[in-house]
Structure formats: C-alpha cells, structure tokens
Amino acid sequence: MKKIILKKGKERSLLRKHPWIFSGAIEKSENDIAVGETVEVLSSSGVFLARAAFSPHSQIRARIWTFDPEEKIDSDFFDKKITQALRYRESLPNLVGERSLRIVNSESDGLPGLIVDRYENILVVQFLSAGTEQNRKLILESLKKIENISVIYERSDTDARKKEGLTLSAGIIQGELPDRQIKIIESGINYNIDIETGHKTGFYLDQKLNRRILKKYAAGKRILNCFSYTGGFSLAAIAGGAKEITNIDSSREALETLNLNMNLNNMDIGRSKNICGDVFRELRYFRNSGDKFDLIVLDPPKFADSQAKMEKAAKGYKDINYQAFRILEEGGVLFTFSCSGLMQPELFRKIVADAALDAGRKIRFAEQLFQSPDHPFGGEFPEGLYLKGVIVIAE
Ligand code: SAH
C-alpha cells in the first residue's frame, strides 16, 4: 500500500480521531497515488496512524477510513460500517416506525463522503469524496444487502464533487423509479418527493423532529413559513391545527409540490396561501401593510459556505430575523434556523438576540434545536453539526 508521511506534530488531530488530513499537514506522499486510492498514513517518525482515502485535488487531502492497523478497506469493512449505521438508527426512539430517513451520514458514520438517504424502499446515494467514488462498487454491494430495498438512485450532482476533482453524476443504479414523484410518510404526514430534481436527495429529512415540535406549537395560529420549499413545516403546522398558513419560497415548482402535498393529506387548501418571491422583500411588504403573524418559521438556505462569506451571512441572518420580529404578534413564536456549518450555535443566538433588540422586542429562548438524530455528528467531528435553530418567544 502506498504511504503518506505527515509533518512533525501534524499527527495531533489524528490521535484525537479527527478524520481529515489537510494538504498542509503532509510532508511527503508517494508518487502516482490514484484519486481515492487507500493509503497508509504515517507520522513524521514513521509510526502507523491510519488508512485513508487520498484526494489529490482537495484541500482535505486524505479522509480516514480506519485508525486500526489490522483493518482492511474491503467489502467486510463497508458491510460493517453500514450495519453499524443502521443499528445506530434503530436505537433512536424518536425514529421508531420512520421509513424515510438518512441511514449513512458521511464522516459521522465512519464513511467520509458517503450520504445515503432512505425513502421507504428507495435508497438515494451520494458519493461525495474521491474515496467513496473509488470504492463505489464495494459500497453498492453492501447497500444492496439492506432488506426491503427495490431501487437505488444516485444523486452525486452536488458541488462537493467538484472540490474532489470528480464530475457530477446522477441516475438509476438499481431498479426503476415508480413515478416522477414518489410518496413517503413522515411522522404520519404524506409528502411527494422528487428524487431526480429535488433539493439534496429530494427532501429536508434533517428537519424531521423539528417539524414535530412545530406541530405542537401550531394550534389556532396564523403562521408564516419563510423558505417553505415543498411545505415540510407547513403540513406539520396544519396537522397541528394551525388556523392558516402563508408560505414564501422563490421556487414556483416547490410551491406547486406544496399544494400537491396539501391535497395528498386532504388538507383544506383554503387555509394555505403561497407567495412566490424573495423572503427579504416579502417580509418588508408585510411590515408596510401591517400584517402580523402568531408564529414565523425562518429556514433559509446556507448563507455561508466559507469563512470569507461569514460576515455577509451574519448580516443576512440578522436582517431576516429583524424583519420577522417586526411582524410577529405580541407573545408570538419564532422558529429560526441556520444550516451554515460555520455558524456556531452561540453566535447564531447572539445574532437573533441582536435582531430582537434592534426591533425593540424582548425575547426568551425557549428551545435549542439541531439536525435530527438520523443526521448525527461524531464526538470527534464537530464539523458534522450544521443545522441549528432556536424557538424564540417574543413579548
Ligand atoms: N424548510 C424547508 C427547507 C428550506 S430549503 C423544509 O423543511 O423542507 C430553502 C428554500 O429556500 C428552498 O426551497 C429555496 O427555493 C428557497 N429560497 C432560497 N432563497 C430564497 C429567497 N431569497 N427567498 C425565498 N425563498 C428562497
């Protein structure tokens, strides 16, 4: 097996079981290592540290498969990791009975760059790293052993692939998609999912438990769901007895699916209104017209994907939260999220608190929210936490 040798002192993060090796940490790597090839990682003094997938085009030059010198990266390895990932999810009481969930979450399940989402009997797979691409055959063999799966679809069409020097790739791997839109049930609510063209692998599974919490807050309320996408939160709100809901999204297609989803659940479409537009602008229109809401959801797309964009992102978060506080009724509830991994929960709360202060609202943080537990983050891998939110009650 080819070897890479780290610079002196650069073994520290590996000794703490962190799974990434940055390009600057490498003293020497052997010639002609293929993209995604498994290499042995040695300390500057030649001590074995790990086996890793080499990624010559990425700043994250290698991603660790194992710290165990005895462990080979073969079909048994992938079988074991996937079995462990399934067992972890089976151990989660909040997911009992859920048949649509993330079953492999990359580094946090010991498989850097591999995402597998399950929608009933369909698996949607993303090979996002050179190492997963190189081992795709073995990984697929392991996935095919999962019970009650008829279809495997690939959605490796995200920008993460480009950073790894891989081309985008999407399409059927096994079986056939029954329809352009498939139907799933999440927490007892029906949703149409477009696996081929939907965001992520089709649905924001990471908000599963937060939707259930929203359902409990919704009874009798006038709700505004900003960045609604296909209505994940909206349907939960209606199921929870919301009086009426207004959805804002810039995607007309997402709002059309939202309407389909309302019908699919025999929900009264008269209680739901859609605005296809820009949230930043629409919130200001509500302020001008004097329209107010009892509960507002802010679940925007990622505003920052690099440290350089953080300042602008912080301004964006502050602006929408400020605008929301200005149109929130007395005693109103705000569910506000950030899915930028670089935004730390504490800083996010500070931004929300500052927005409230500027809007002249006194607030309390009632609950801290995270991504649902089928999207775990490892103890040694804090980067795995990306989605955070708070429930705020405003006086
Ligand atoms: N809350 C959703 C997921 C939201 S994803 C759920 O639980 O399923 C973010 C959504 O914001 C996408 O649907 C995207 O179309 C929309 N979007 C992005 N920028 C926007 C903007 N400036 N105004 C309105 N919608 C926007």
Image (tube, grey):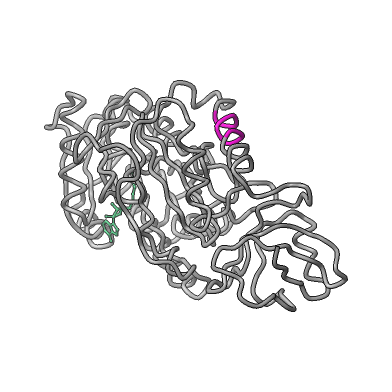
Q: Is residue 342 above or below residue 105?
A: below
| Tally of numbered tags | 0
Residue at position x 72%, y 62% from top? 40
Residue at position x 23%, y 60% from top? 278
Quarter occupied by residue 13: bottom right
Q: Which residues are magenta?
A: 83-89
Residue at position x 47%, y 55% from top? 352
In which quadrant is the N terminus drawn? bottom right
Q: Nearer the viewer, residue 221 or 347?
A: 347
Residue 32: percent from left, percent from top = 61, 75
Residue sticking out furthest to the right: 45
Q: Nearer the viewer, residue 253 or 304?
A: 253
Q: Is residue 368 above or below residue 57?
A: above
Residue at position x 44%, y 59% from top? 355
Residue 91: percent from left, percent from top = 59, 26
| Residue 283 placement, left or right of 330 | left
| Residue 53 placement, left or right of 200 | right
Q: Is residue 300 above or below residue 208?
A: below
**Dominant secondary structure, magenta:** helix
| Residue 17 seen in this snapshot | yes
Quarter occupied by residue 48: bottom right
Q: Is residue 56 above or below residue 379?
A: below
Residue 121: percent from left, percent from top = 36, 30
